[in-house]
């Protein structure tokens, strides 16, 4: 996937995201559906390097600025990313000025620093903070204490490694009426700990667990209007880029007459970071 991404210094990068298939993440967070894109058992040595090499060889045109390697697991878990692939992917990533990988905060450590030293470009690590709402934190099955997130964030920033943070909108066990407020508070928490980029991700149904929680009254799917409001309120933050994750945004509950215009507006905000008037829609009478 090729896309333009704004950085904290105001520049806009061209980013190539490569989705790699490998071992499933061991943390089994209740809201996650990425296990559908993983395999049973450890990642076979060499598999990730072959996948990345296939994608890069098929890419034509100028080399993008940033390479994002998303493996639906933890890049610094050697069950998911064997040592052989670390060396191979480092070589393949040499033409890129920056590389982004994803990891649970619990797996950020010495192996992260070693990977950063191997890279020719600058490393960025994407970490899921999700929410700081205390009831939700206790029920997400993420096994992440805020103190451990803080430690990982501090380690990264002290070593010149950029921090990207994933924040949920509509996390299970957060009241729908408080969803936007907790999303904004969580984004603010990430900003205070040095996040260069914060991505607001609306929680999706479809993994089975979200449907079970919805039946219990513990999960209400977030709406497109809530995503708009969350991003609008986060544009006030300085020194950090906050964006709305628009993957499957067309599936979010929304007015059919203004849905497309609202998604287009969010796409613009993601790239420019400049506030602009909200969409007015006679059908749903919002502005």
Image (cartoon, rainbow, N blue to C red):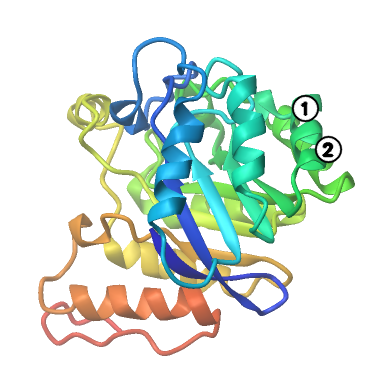
Residue at screen point 26% across, 24% down: 209
Residue situated in front as seen by the camera: 227 or 122: 122
In the displayed structure image, the side of residue 29 where residue 126 appears, left or right: right
Residue at screen point 42% across, 20% down: 24
> Alpha-carbon neighbours of circle 1 within 10 Å: few (<14), some, or many (≥20)?
some
How many marks are shown on the rendered structure?
Answer: 2
Q: CA distance from mark 1 to mark 2?
A: 8 Å
The percent coordinates of residue 25 (x first, y second) are 47, 21
In the displayed structure image, the side of residue 88 where residue 260 appears, left or right: left
Residue at screen point 48% across, 59% down: 16
Q: Is residue 119 above or below residue 77?
A: below
Residue at screen point 28% across, 63% down: 224
Residue situated in front as seen by the camera: 44 or 80: 44
The percent coordinates of residue 214 (x first, y second) are 22, 33
* Element under disc 2: helix
Residue at the spot of label 2: 155
The percent coordinates of residue 4 (x first, y second) are 48, 72
Visible residue check, residue 178: no
Asked whether the beta carbons under mark 1 and mark 2 sit within 8 Å of each other, the answer is yes
**Mark linked to residue 109:** 1
* Element under disc 1: loop
**Mark linked to residue 159:** none
Residue situated in front as seen by the camera: 166 or 5: 5
The percent coordinates of residue 157 (x first, y second) are 82, 48
In the displayed structure image, the side of residue 41 where residue 5 appears, left or right: right
Residue 194 picture quarter: bottom right
């Amino acid at each position: 996937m090729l896309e333009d991404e704004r950085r904290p210094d105001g520049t806009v990068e061209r980013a190539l995201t490569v989705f790699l298939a490998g071992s499933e993440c061991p943390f089994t967070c209740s809201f996650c559906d990425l296990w559908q894109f993983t395999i049973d058992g450890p990642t076979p040595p060499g598999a990730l390097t072959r996948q990345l090499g296939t994608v890069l060889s098929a890419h034509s045109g100028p080399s993008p600025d940033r390479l994002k390697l998303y493996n639906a697991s933890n890049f610094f878990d050697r069950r998911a990313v064997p040592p052989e692939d670390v060396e191979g992917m480092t070589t393949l990533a040499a033409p890129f000025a920056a590389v982004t990988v994803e990891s649970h905060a619990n797996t950020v450590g010495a192996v992260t620093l070693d990977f950063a030293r191997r890279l020719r470009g600058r490393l960025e690590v994407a970490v899921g903070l999700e929410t700081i709402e205390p009831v939700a934190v206790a029920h997400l099955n993420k096994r992440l204490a805020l103190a451990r997130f803080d430690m990982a964030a501090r380690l990264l920033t002290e070593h010149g490694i950029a921090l990207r943070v994933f924040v949920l909108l509509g996390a299970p066990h957060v009241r729908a009426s408080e969803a936007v407020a907790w999303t904004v508070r969580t984004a603010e928490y990430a900003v205070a700990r040095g996040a260069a980029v914060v991505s607001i991700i609306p929680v999706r149904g479809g993994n089975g667990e979200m449907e079970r929680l919805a039946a219990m009254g513990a999960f209400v799917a977030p709406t497109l209007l809530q995503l708009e409001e969350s991003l609008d309120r986060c544009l006030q933050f300085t020194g950090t880029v906050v964006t709305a994750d628009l993957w499957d945004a067309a599936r979010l509950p929304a007015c059919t007459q203004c849905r497309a215009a609202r998604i287009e507006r969010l796409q613009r905000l993601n790239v420019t970071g400049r506030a602009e008037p909200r969409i007015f829609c006679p059908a749903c009478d919002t502005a």
